[in-house]
Image: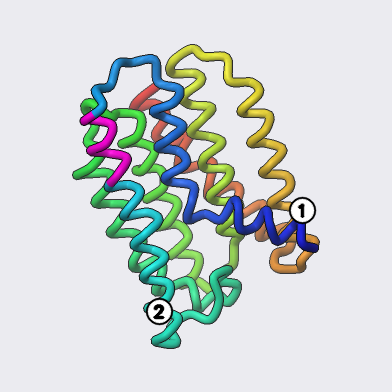
Amino acid sequence: MYFTKLFNYLFHPVFMPFTGTIAYFVTSPAYIPEEARKSIIIPVLILTLIVPVLLYFLFRNLGWIRSAELSDIEDRKIPLYAAIPIIFIISIRITPEPPSEALHYYFTGILGTLLCCLVLVILKIRASIHMMGITGLSTFVLGLSLHYHLNMTSLLAALIIFSGIVASSGLHQNTHNNREILLGMALGIIPQTVVFPFWL
């Protein structure tokens, strides 16, 4: 039980945008000046990690959400309303297409995932947000491997294993059923693959 909870926290979807950003800068063979890196990494860190944590405590104190896992479908609306404009700003202002083409489309894919998730919430349909995050990141790393012709088999294998552990964790803790896991995977993978033709 402790092991599965630990993985839920380690691979919480709030970490995935920043993790993808770091993965981009670590794997990209293109020369990127230090100042350019900082101008992207620092704002992404603030907007995708620090701001969401502060908003979580605010929403929790206001009684708008009840848990960090957002297990109740109604708990997801307000965080999604907050996350969508944040990711939109990052995509348009912080990672513009040139020179950060791959990152721009990564965040565009994340935006598509969030919009689809919001539609499902409005329709009262649950999907695993954890699976959206980890499979979206895995798909982006696959794209980086294809784009830069890099052998990233070990990293991709690790991400697939982590995805399986996250899925098993959701099923083991009875927070999600098979349909919700598969739906979360689809919402993580499909938006990222849809934008592949624009940057691969």
Q: Which residue shows up at 40% across the image and 21% down it?
A: 28
Asked if residue 106 lies left or right of residue 86, the reply is right
Q: Secondary structure at mark 2?
A: helix
Residue 38 counted in the magenta span:
yes
Q: Which residue shows up at 39% across the image and 34% down it?
A: 195
Residue found at the very far top of the displayed protein: 149
Residue 198 counted in the magenta span:
no
Q: Amino acid at mark 1?
A: Ser
In the rendered structure, find residue 110 and report the number of the disc placed on it. Answer: none
Residues rendered magenta in the picture: 35-42
Q: Chief secondary structure of the magenta span?
A: helix
Crowd rating for badge 2 (residues with CA inside 10 Å; few <14, some 14–19, many 20+): some
Q: Secondary structure at mark 1?
A: helix
Q: Which residue shows up at 55% across the image and 51% down it?
A: 132
Disc 1 target residue:
168
Q: Quadrant of residue 134?
A: top right
